[in-house]
């Protein structure tokens, strides 16, 4: 295997989207693209997945998709009431309650702001003050994302007729060029030409749920290199992907979890059992202490035993970025 090559994939949505750009879902789309495209070797998908037998040298690592020029906000313990009163003064807390709540609930941060934080230890106080400084910028980004509840008719798959039942579904629209995302990818298996073929296939077919009705249509551009902040002496890492650690990976840190009820796509979507077993994954932005972190260190795996079909796997690798945090909760 050759050394890893780094790529940034710039995605521009052309339509509303239902499914978020999460690493495991993107990976599934990549696998189906490999399955259906024509390659120089037979059964390219099997060959690709076989490379993951060496867990320490996966052929491809991929991040979640982030709004352009943004990354996940590191998950740290919440700021104390004393810190909030120092920032806003006690008498201004109520007036700024919406601002405080928005900052606490935000899960993204401008990439340049994270680089500023990377100059030293990241603490809850520094992070909150940093987010407060760019509050208006984050608000403008939020205003570009319009979540709409769309009503759909229930249709008989046999007769093709409307049966009268309604169900609602969240669909995300973007305003004023808001639907622009960045995905980061490392590979020692695919060439740039092959990656372009894969993402052309995905973009033409659409991404995620309801792609057959035009959802998740996008254009893209792949460039070499990844512009991600790192620190000289990290003692932790933040994952930019949905992630499940192996028994040997560190688990001490600060994190959020997401429940995954994976559904198979492609030829398996209409099988007798299209659902994977439920999984609990750490979300992007989760932070884990690891004094042995170094660039290129691998965390996670390609999970087995996620479906009755033993050939089916689930992508659960971290896409780590080194950071430095205080190790003791009371000191953060």
Image (cartoon, grey):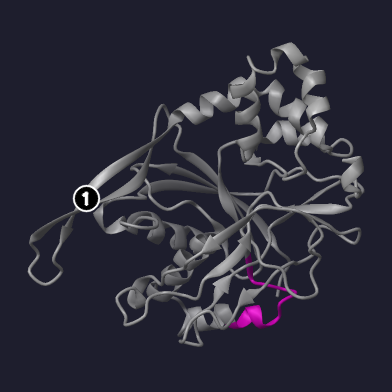
Camera-nearest residue between 66 and 283: 283
Residue 127 pos. (x, y %): 77, 33
Residue 291 pos. (x, y %): 91, 58
Residue 197 pos. (x, y %): 44, 62
Please give the residue where the numbered disc 1 appears in the rendered image.
152
Asked if residue 74 lies in the magenta stretch, the reply is no
Tell me the quadrant of the picture where the C terminus can be found.
top right
User: As displayed, is residue 20 above or below residue 149?
Assistant: below
Asked if residue 52 lies in the magenta stretch, the reply is yes
Q: How many marks?
A: 1
The image quarter containing residue 33 is: bottom left
Tell me if 116 is positioned left or right of 304 in this view: right
What is the residue that sits farthest to the top in this orientation? 91
Residue 290 pos. (x, y %): 86, 59
Residue in view at x 71 percent, y 80 percent:
54
Tell me if 128 is positioned left or right of 109 in this view: right
Residue in view at x 89 percent, y 53 percent:
235
User: As displayed, is residue 105 above or below residue 278?
Assistant: above
The image quarter containing residue 77 is: top right
Camera-nearest residue between 196 and 303: 303
What's the magenta region? 50-60
User: As displayed, is residue 230 above or below residue 158?
Assistant: above
Residue in view at x 82 percent, y 19 percent:
86
Helix, strand or loop at label 1? It is strand
């Amino acid at each position: 295997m050759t050394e890893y090559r780094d790529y940034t994939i710039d995605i521009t949505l052309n339509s509303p989207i239902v499914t978020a750009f999460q690493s495991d879902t993107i990976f599934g789309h990549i696998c189906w693209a490999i399955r259906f495209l024509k390659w120089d070797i037979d059964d390219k998908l099997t060959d690709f997945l076989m490379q993951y037998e060496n867990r320490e040298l996966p052929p491809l690592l991929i991040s979640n998709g982030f709004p352009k020029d943004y990354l996940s906000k590191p998950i740290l313990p919440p700021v104390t009431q004393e810190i909030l009163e120092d920032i806003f003064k006690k008498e201004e807390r109520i007036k700024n309650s919406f601002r405080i709540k928005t900052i606490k609930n935000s899960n993204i941060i401008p990439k340049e702001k994270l680089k500023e934080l990377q100059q030293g230890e990241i603490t809850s106080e520094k992070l909150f003050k940093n987010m407060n400084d760019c509050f208006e910028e984050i608000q403008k980004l939020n205003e570009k994302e319009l979540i709409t509840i769309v009503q759909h008719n229930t249709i008989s798959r046999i007769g093709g007729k409307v049966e009268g039942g309604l169900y609602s579904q969240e669909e995300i629209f973007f305003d004023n060029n808001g639907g622009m995302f960045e995905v980061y990818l490392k590979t020692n298996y695919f060439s740039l030409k092959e990656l372009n073929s894969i993402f052309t296939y995905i973009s033409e077919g659409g991404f995620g749920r309801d792609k057959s009705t035009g959802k998740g249509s996008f254009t893209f551009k792949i460039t070499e290199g990844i512009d991600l902040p790192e620190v000289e002496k990290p003692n932790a890492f933040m994952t930019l992907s949905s992630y499940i650690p192996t028994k040997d990976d560190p688990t001490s840190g600060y994190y959020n979890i997401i429940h995954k009820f994976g559904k198979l796509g492609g030829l398996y979507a209409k099988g007798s059992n299209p659902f994977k077993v439920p999984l609990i994954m750490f979300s992007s932005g989760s932070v884990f202490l690891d004094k042995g972190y170094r660039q290129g260190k691998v965390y996670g795996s390609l999970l087995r035993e996620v479906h009755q079909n033993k050939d089916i796997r689930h992508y659960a690798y971290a896409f780590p970025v080194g950071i430095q945090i205080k190790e003791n909760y009371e000191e953060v």
